[in-house]
Amino acid sequence: MTFVLIHGAGYGANCWDELIPHLDAQALAVDLPGRGTRADVELATVTLTDCADAVRADIEAKDLRDVVLVGHSFAGVTVPRVLDLMPERIRRVVLVSAVAPPDGSRVLDQIDPAVRELVEQSITGGVYHQSREGAAAMLCNDMDEATATSALDRLADDSAALLSEPVDLSGYRRGIPLTYLHLTRDQCYVEDLQQRSIALLGAEVIDLDTGHLAMVSAPAPLAAALNAIHG
């Protein structure tokens, strides 16, 4: 069994660095196109299909099977596309405060209005660039100063097009076991939106008392939850 970790918007695979040592199985953290190991890809061109293809490529490169697919935040709209590409390799899905808006809608239309305004102000030339100040308010409310600095130092630009591309959630209907980790102190994907996603997916729910970047602020509790539900 292998944990395959898919980051959300504004980050790369290194957001999982604190978590991985606490996991009781091997883990693969994927860089989606435009950052990290795939920084050569022009961000403004990246689509959700490109994101799913990147995950598939990394899984196939290591010939991984019996995969627990872990998606954080915006990865909630990449995960179902991966499930459609390789359902036979996926054992379980775990979503960590993940975005799951109604099928065919846009992520940008489903997020909290106050957050959406900040996001729209952060888009230039097809690239979504978060300021440290805005990210600190949304992402670091449960962190001490040193942890917040570490998290903010890893911020990455993202493709604005991903926020306005219609989502396809059909992969979630394949019957692969699904658990949703509900983050009770999340100020980015706020309570009402998490509950909408949970209701839409009909997922098993586990509560964690953390903010949005649980893998940074509370890696041991998050790992304990993943280790407990991977079966």
Image (cartoon, grey):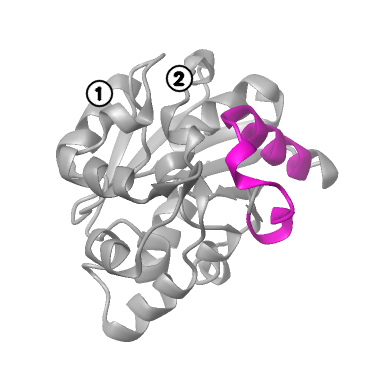
The residue depicted at 20 percent of the width and 54 percent of the height is: 187
Mark closer to the chain start, 2 or 1? 2
Q: Are marks 2 and 1 in contact (CB under 8 Å)?
A: no
Looking at the image, the residue that sits furthest to the bottom is 146
Q: Which region is colored magenta?
A: 35-59
Alpha-carbon neighbours of circle 1 within 10 Å: few (<14), some, or many (≥20)?
Answer: few
- Residue 68: image location, x then y, percent: 58, 41
Instruction: Using the rendered image of the protein, determine whether residue 25 is visible from the camera's viewpoint.
Output: yes
Q: Which residue is mark 2?
A: 166
Amino acid on which the number 1 mark rests in the picture: Ala
Q: Quadrant of residue 73?
A: top left
Q: Residue furthest front?
A: 125
Instruction: Name the side, left or right, on which 49 lies relative to 96.
Output: right
Left or right? Give the position of 62 relative to 91.
right
For label 1, the residue is 199
Q: Is residue 94 visible?
A: no
Image vertical order of residue 29 relative to residue 116, above or below? below
Identify the secondary structure beneath mark 1: helix
Task: Give the percent coordinates (x, y) of residue 18.
Answer: 50, 72
For residue 87, which quarter of the picture? top right
**Mark 2 to mark 1: distance in Å?**
20 Å
Disc on res. 3:
none
